[in-house]
Structures are given as structure tokens and as C-alpha cells.
Amino acid sequence: MKSMKHLGLQLRITFYAGKKVEEGTFGKGIATLMRGVDDLGSLNAAAKKIHMAYSKAWRITKETEAGFGFNLIDRDGARGSTLTAEGRKLLSAYEQLEAEGSEFLASRFKELITTK
């Protein structure tokens, strides 16, 4: 029988507003876009970097903002976009929880599959 040491674990975090996840979500996709906006100064450039259509990036950003009740990015037309204070705080919380959660769960998963 093959060892389970080659198995991995991936944590998925989703922030949501309201009583239903569908009412506005912030997960891996929107977090990646927001990181791109922060790094590149443009939603369009962020979308291109991850091979996402700008129209989809715009749509999911607007849906998340509508569901959460606040803007994630400030748009300045041809000059690009920047994260709002709320967008930056949400992205930071997401990245921190993802890192801490992944580290803990990877360690715990290893314990569970290597114990007899």
C-alpha cells in the first residue's frame, strides 16, 4: 500500500455578507484581483495578469461591493484604481487568515495521517 505522505491540503476561505453566501462573497478570485489592483494600480492590469476577462473582473468586483455595502476599490478612470481602506483591510485579513490557517491545517493534517 502506498504511503499518504504525498497528499496535500488546500484551505479555501470565503467571507460573505448577509445570511447567504450568494449575497456577496470575497474569496480567492476577488482576493487575487485586489492584490493585483494593489500591486499594479489597475483592475484591467490585474485581470490580464490572471488571464481573466476585464468584464468578469468588473462584474465580480461590483457584485462583491454590492453585497458587502462598501467599495473595495476607488476608480480613477484612465488613471487606474486603488484599494479603499476597507478593501485593503479585507484583503489583509484574508491573506493573514489564509496563511495562518494553511500553516495550522497542514501541520494538523500531517499529524493525522502519520499517526497509527
Image: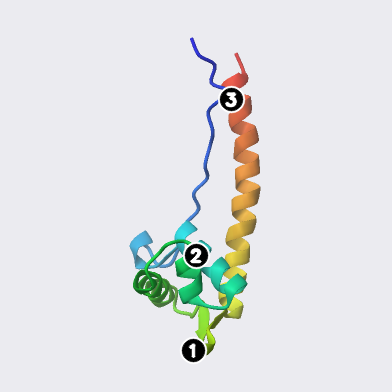
Task: Say whether marks 3 and 2 touch (CB < 8 Å).
Answer: no
The residue that label 2 is drawn on is 49
Residue 74 appears at what percent x and percent y? 52, 84
Give SS at disc 3.
Answer: helix
- Neighbor class of circle 1 (other Cα within 10 Å; few <14, some 14-19, many 20+) is few
Mark drawn on residue 112: 3
**Residue 10 in the image: above or below residue 115:** below
Residue found at x 60% / y 44%: 102
Residue found at x 55% / y 68%: 36
Residue closest to the eye, 12 or 18: 12
Residue closest to the eye, 91 or 115: 91
Side (left or right) of 86 relative to 62? right
* Farthest residue, direction top: 1
Residue 54 appears at what percent x and percent y? 39, 73
Of callouts 3 and 2, the N-terminal one: 2
Residue 106 appears at what percent x and percent y? 61, 36
The image quadrant where one finds the C terminus is: top right
Q: Identity of the amino acid at label 1?
A: Ala
Of callouts 1 and 3, the N-terminal one: 1
Residue found at x 58% / y 23%: 5
Number of numbered discs on residues: 3
Give SS at disc 1.
Answer: helix
Kindly report which numbered mark, 3 or 2, lies closer to the viewer in this rendering: 2
Q: Identity of the amino acid at label 3?
A: Leu
Mark drawn on residue 78: 1
